[in-house]
Image (cartoon, rainbow, N blue to C red):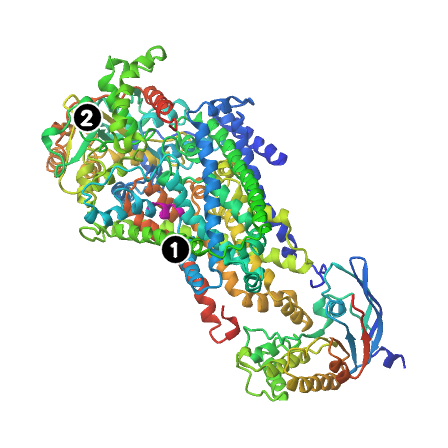
Amino acid sequence: MTESRDKGLALTDITIGLNGRTLLRLSARVAPGAVLTVMGPSGSGKSSLLAYIGGFLDPAFVASGSCRVDGLELTSLPAEQRHAGLLFQDPLLFPHMSVAANIAFAVPPSVRSRAERRAIAERALAEIELAGFGDRDPDTLSGGQKARVALQRVLVSQPRLLLLDEPFSKLDMALRDQARQLVFDRANAAGLPVVLVTHDEADAAAAGGAVFEMRAA
Amino acid sequence: MALAARPTGSLSFVRLAPGLTLAVLLLPIAFGLAATFLPAFGYLPALGGTELTLAHFESLFAMPAIWRSAALSLLTGVVTAGVSLLIVMLFVAGWAGTRTFARLQHAVSPLLAIPHAAAAFGLAFLIAPSGFLVRLAAPWAGIERPPDWLIVNDPLGLTMMAGLVAKEMPFLLLVTLAALPQVKRAETMQLVSAFGYGRIAGFLFTLWPQVYRQIRFAVYAVIAYATAVVDVAVILGPNLPAILPVRLLQWMNDPDLSLRFLASAGAVLQLGVTLGALLGWLVIEQVASSICAALRGRGLRMVRERMLRIAALAATGTTAVLVFGGIALLALWSFAALWQFPAILPDAFTLSTWQRALPRILEPLAVTLGAGALSTAIALCLTIACLEQEARTGRVAGRRAMLAIYLPLIVPQIAFVFGLQVLFLASGTDQRFAALVFVHLVFVLPYVFLSLSDPWRAFDRRYDLIAAGLGRSRLALLLKVRLPMLSRAVLTAAAVGFAVSVGQYLPTVLIGEGRLTTVTTEAVALAAGGNRRVIGVYAFLQTLLPFLAFAIASLAPALLWRNRRAMRP
Amino acid sequence: MRLATIALTATFLVGFCMSGASAADPDPAEWQAVLDEAEGQTVYFNAWGGSENINAYLEWVGEETQRRFGVELVHVKIDDTANAVARVLAERTSGKDEGGSVDLIWINGENFVAMKEEDLLMQPGWAGDLPNWRYVDVENQPTILTDFTEPVEGLESPWGGAKLVFFYDSARLDAEQLPDSAGGLLEWAKANPGRLSYPAPPDFIGSSFLKQVLSEVIDDPAKLQEPVNEQTFEADVAPLFDYLDALHPVAWRSGKAFPQNYPDMKQKLADGELDIVFAFNPAEASAAIAAGELPDTVRSFTFSEGTLGNTHFVAIPYNANAKAGALVVANFLIAPDAQLRKQDPAYWGDPTVLALQKLGEEDRAAFDALELGVATLAPDELGPVIDEPHASWMDRIEEEWRRRYITGN
């Protein structure tokens, strides 16, 4: 029983303040494959939660509380050892790398051979129907294609959890549903706990998990 | 946002970098000033000065017209900076965002690479009574002999100030262009024009204060440079008396060695003059901002600004034409056989000047390239390490750190390089080249830092976060993401640093001691001979080197990323 | 800042305490030993680098000393000899009494006096012991033994002669109207306003012009061979400054600006801004014609009562690193073939310090056969030599000149 309780993301007594004002106080559990949605208007500091979990909170903020993934305490680790996969509203593909190189960049260092890293990247592209796009300039892809490449890039890095910062807000309405579907399905399939920050009710509905509402600061 | 900085033990160089950088910038100035101040107050045992005394200041103030020299220096600094800034301000206010602006901006940027002395020589030949402009006018004005007009070397130094403006205006323009993206220009201008303001008034009232706050240190550097300038003043400046730094250098070079004390006292006065000019400028800043506030309070719209806009455009364009024209004429001189007044072109062309000069230029060229490349490389490493440390800790260099970075540009070179030479000799080392690289570093580092820090800070930090989230180390992130994505900015900063190194005269002469010569020290030595043909050869080479560096900085990324659309400028 | 001050003070003190030591110097009387020691040495020759002709000549000298004696010569180009003096001084300041950076220095006049008085020169006198000294024209060129009235005492070795010579463009000026004295020059300037000037002191040529005028207008020229007498100085130089007061209103730019140096005057002669200029090298104009800098109508003249003349030298600093090599170079510079090439206007055109009658048959013939150039006066047309005044006069005249004319009005 303890084992299944330890699975997933456990946020305990998270407090984040700025200039003596408390922005957020939160305890929550996110099971593998489940989504915690944090809703709030812009400027409410909801992104600071992602920053705290990911390890890149500005020193101006005062924060405390524990973040455990599968029993492992994240807050004592530097950002690059937390393996918290990030998606922003922009795909942020590295503009100087080819599409495949973007994904290969994320393959864990345990895979040493160049050819193997490349093969992993090609497989990841095939999974999102972009086989053969590996050598392309990322800037020549469409918005939806870029978003999918960004998702695959995060997934091949074998993250412990996903942190999503309004990832669908810049997509066309038509693409948005598809993208939500894809992200949540694949997170679920990979058994990753997800924290989603958004101000779009539809995102929360599609995520289907617990919703934490922030008040306007 | 800052990535959590944890003492991992790796990359400790990055953590030491800010301290190291400050040491490189400040220690040489501290030592150099000390070695200048002590003789000024009589302490220089090698020349029998063992007692502290004010006698050398008394003899300094007894020098004929010394106060006029000092006042002229001060005025030169303030007027040069004021006029340059005014032109830049009106030009940016009146034309930013137009196609004319973009075109002229590209024409003006290369002016920065032209060494001061070369630009001054070119200008002198253009405007002298026997110069090119009078020669153009001669046929229809019926001029057979050059008129005896006092244009160059005028007693008030107006020609000298014009020469300085021609070089400093492009510098301030480029600094302003770098600051411009950080204000919301297009949006604000739409807004104020909707309120019925003219371009210039709208810009001045809303955007200029923010822009000026960012470029003010550069303005101070211009003031400091112009109060202590030697090469341009010798070529274009007044003779009787010359401005203070020129007289100072004469005393430093006088065979009567006891004049070293006088020169040191003069260097202290020079420091005072520079400080005085800066203080005067602070007063002008206050007055100007009150006037601006008063005009704004009266709701001045200045809709009829056509003439002012055209004047600003003309001033900027004329500068570019004069400096480029001067350099082109010098290049022509380097191929000229006999070329007498009032001929517009030489009687014949010859390669003999080049043939005589080229074999002797190879060694100085190697030193120029070596010192420039090394000092620039070290400056880049220090700058990148400082900016990395800044990114990790989230602490951006404050005002005090900015002052430290500008200090080598604000303290007059002449006031501390003599002391540095004594220090180098005292160290007993024969690592002359290393010392040369180090001294160049003192002047290269500020420029590299200033040109790289803005693009570095403007970099979209989310790329860092994504890479960290993907589990890649800081170093991998730096090498594989930051540096490639900022390659254009890094190479431009390197080109700026290289150009600064190439232009160094005084430090190179003092530390190189004539055994290490660069294209610039050779050029100034030959300029002592006043031979326009040889000056043409060296001015051309002196200009070519920085141009090549800038060309590489713009072509290499274009070639490297030719298949990456988002990497285009 | 305080730390810096302390460290620097320590530096000065160390330098102060360490001066005075010196290793055994080579003795030119033992010439073979000098040659042996010199082989493989590198000599840093600090010499004015403002003339491409001279630079090229020194390059040839370097090739020859390398080939003949295995001595490498590096021409350290300086824009002012005083810089090299300053460097030696800075080295003594920091206690560098051996292995100095200057091995040989092109020098004369006040720079020599300054180094001699500060004991910055290699002692004891060595020039008279050089093997080629036997050719030097000590009998007819008194300026070889007294440099600006300062006894040379063998502390510097002669290299070339100099004499004040005037140039004009015969296409513009009639040879009949040329002045023949300082007084005549002033009358000419009054008749041709704006076409005469001189480089402002302390430029070497400008100061020489002042000395030329003073030599002609002072009540008793013998006074100039003695140090300045402060009691009579004001009265002694009054005629000079009366002269200048009269000249300036009719000078180029009405005396409000001055050319920088001789090359600047040469350019202004070509530009037509000046009509009469002057130099210290009689062959200058011919060289400039050959280089295309002046039209081939330029000619020379001097004053029949004489013009200033002097000798320029090379000296070795007390702390030179390659003294033996420097001696070998100094000796080669007065070798007949080196002097012949130097006097040839195709290379430099600088008058020799050797006495032709002391040379061998062949060398003498070669000197006689030199084509001096259209604008160069033959040695017997140069007129009498007026001795340089004592070095103290130069300082005081320059000072007085500054006091009177650097007024800013």
Residue at image position (54%, 73%) is: A96
- Give SS at disc 1: helix
Residue B514 shows in the view: no
For the residues bearing labels 2 and 1, Cβ distance under 8 angstroms:
no
Q: Quadrant of residue C182?
A: top left
The residue identified by callout 2 is C185
**Residue farthest to the right, as pictured:** A1
Q: Quadrant of the N terminus of chain C?
A: top right
Q: Label 2: chain?
A: C
Q: Quadrant of residue B461?
A: bottom right
**Which mark identifies residue B317?**
1
Residue A44 in the image: above or below residue C119: below
- Left or right: B547, with A59 as reference point: left
Under mark 1, the amino acid is: Gly
- Left or right: B36, with C193 as reference point: right
Magenta span of residues: B116-121
